[in-house]
Amino acid sequence: MTLDNEVRSLQALPMFRGVDPAKLKLLAFASERLNFSETDHFFRQGDPADAAYVVLSGKVHVVLENDGACLKVAELPRGSVVGEMGILTDNPRSASIVAAEPTVALRIRKDVFFDLIKEFPQIGIAVMRDIAARLERTNAQLAAMQGR
């Protein structure tokens, strides 16, 4: 995937709409493109939160790990941002992210992510909306499980 393709992928994401393409090119250049095979971990639950990831292709599973047992709680498609909660809260990773198939992601360092939010507040709002939507889905799943 070329730098221009990465910029086009970022432009397609709602959180990056309205961001100057030159800034997105700088973001893509300052970030690391990573290739994951199926079952590769982006990061593990409990790891330090040092970056967010944009899934450019493929999909990932959000997995909770407890005493060796793994519970898949979500599947996120291309265009998803993962790992942002940990860098926003400055807490260790609350879940593991695992490639569900061959996946390409852009790793955005914590400092670069914060600089981007400072310069483009609409990105921060989009991130908050996405986190709130995921929280609502998780609450609904928990309520459904308790009702069984």
Image (cartoon, rainbow, N blue to C red):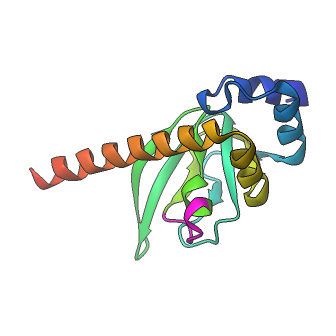
Quarter of the image that includes the N terminus: top right
Q: To which quarter of the image does residue 35 belong?
A: top right
Nearest the viewer among 72 and 137 is 137
Q: Is residue 115 left or right of residue 87?
A: right
Nearest the viewer among 142 and 10 is 10
Verify whether residue 78 appears in magenta: no
Q: To which quarter of the image does residue 70 belong?
A: bottom left
Question: Secondary structure of the magenta portion, mostly?
Answer: loop
Q: Is residue 107 visible?
A: yes
Kindly identify the residue that appears in the image at 78 percent across and 46 percent down. 34
> Outermost residue toward the bottom?
67
Kindly identify the residue that appears in the image at 84 percent across and 39 percent down. 28
* 88 vs 62: above or below: below
Q: Is residue 83 left or right of residue 18?
A: left
Nearest the viewer among 91 and 123 is 123
Kindly identify the residue that appears in the image at 44 percent across and 67 percent down. 65
Tell me residue 62's x, y (percent). 48, 51
Q: To which quarter of the image does residue 137 belong?
A: top left
Kindly identify the residue that appears in the image at 68 percent across and 48 percent down. 53
Nearest the viewer among 121 and 103 is 121
Tell me residue 108's x, y (percent). 75, 50
Q: Total label count?
A: 0
Q: Is residue 96 left or right of residue 29?
A: left
Tell me residue 6's x, y (percent). 81, 30
Query: Which residues are the magenta region?
Result: 88-94
Q: Is residue 18 left or right of residue 1?
A: left
Verify whether residue 90 appears in magenta: yes
Q: Is residue 2 visible?
A: no
Tell me residue 129's x, y (percent). 47, 40
